[in-house]
Amino acid sequence: MAESTPRARGGEKTRDLIVETALRLFRERGYEATTMRAIAAEAGVSVGNAYYYFSSKEQLVQAYYDRAQSEHEAACRDLLASERKFAARLSGVLRAWVRVSEPYHDFAVKFFKHASEPSNPLSPFSGESTPAREAAIAVYHRVVEGSDARVDAELREELPELLWLASMGMVLYWVHDTSPGCARTYRLIEVMVPLIDRLVGLSHLPGLRGVTKDFLMAMRELRS
């Protein structure tokens, strides 16, 4: 066991190096123009070694998704452990996403046309992206379950995924945001979170439960 530990650490370093190199080349040259051979050469490893860790460029992007998700979870940890207000929890999680994603903004702008294609495995809605998508939805599950918000029981079950879908709208806005420090995206969060908070808060009221149920039925039909 002791002999395998340094080897495993070396393998992890090589894997991280390949990912970092790929992301840099994707930013500099574009996703389409960057080959696995070029990534291996820049990383100082053999092409065979690069393919040992990642069978395709798509897997490298999935590794980026996983890394970004882990960074987001870490950035949210203290907030979700201490804050109880739903709006503050949601706002904090969205703002943390923008903050940890800032270094990848240029890459996201160039890469978006691939991720936006419904049939592309790099789409956040694809089967290949399921682990990262489920991990992201789990963060919004924590937002809901750890809050003091009164939420309609049926809506509570669906709310984490709905919040994730709302965050995807924010991501689209962020990709096209050219304001300094993505100030407009932060402003979007300031505007959208109070509206979501009000809608969630109203969902348990008797007069609006019917509207909530109709909305959920429509969502389930569209999902099926």
Image (cartoon, rainbow, N blue to C red):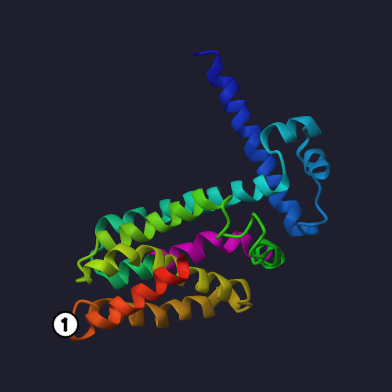
Question: Callout 1: few (<14), some (14-19), or many (20+) C-alpha neighbours within 10 Å?
Answer: few
Q: Indicate the position of residue 4 as horizontal and vertical percent values.
A: 55, 17
Q: Indicate the position of residue 68 as horizontal and vertical percent values.
A: 53, 53
Q: Indicate the position of residue 208 as horizontal and vertical percent values.
A: 23, 84
The residue that mark 1 highlights is 206
Q: Left or right? Give the position of 115 relative to 139.
A: right
Rendered image quadrant of residue 29 = bottom right
Which residue is drawn at the image coordinates 29% and 83% (left, top)?
A: 211
Q: Is residue 85 magenta?
A: no
* Residue 197 visible to the viewer: no
SS at mark 1 in the image = helix
Q: Left or right? Give the position of 186 relative to 49.
A: left
Which residue is drawn at the image coordinates 66% and 61% (left, top)?
A: 119
Q: Left or right? Give the position of 164 relative to 157.
A: right
Examine the residues drawn in magenta and state their main secondary structure: helix
Q: Indicate the position of residue 187 as horizontal and vertical percent values.
A: 47, 80
Q: Is residue 101 magenta?
A: yes
Q: Which residues are magenta?
A: 93-106
Which residue is drawn at the image coordinates 64% and 56% (left, top)?
A: 122
Which residue is drawn at the image coordinates 26% and 63% (left, top)?
A: 83
Q: Left or right? Give the position of 140 relative to 42.
A: left
* Residue 203 visible to the viewer: yes
The image shows a total of numbered marks equal to: 1
Q: Above or below — where is 113 with respect to 128? A: below
Q: Above or below — where is 41 with respect to 136? A: above
Can you name the residue that lies furthest to the bottom here?
207
Rendered image quadrant of residue 173 = bottom right
What amino acid type should be assigned to the residue bearing mark 1?
Answer: Pro
Q: Compare residues 221 and 118 and report the one nearer the observer.
A: 221
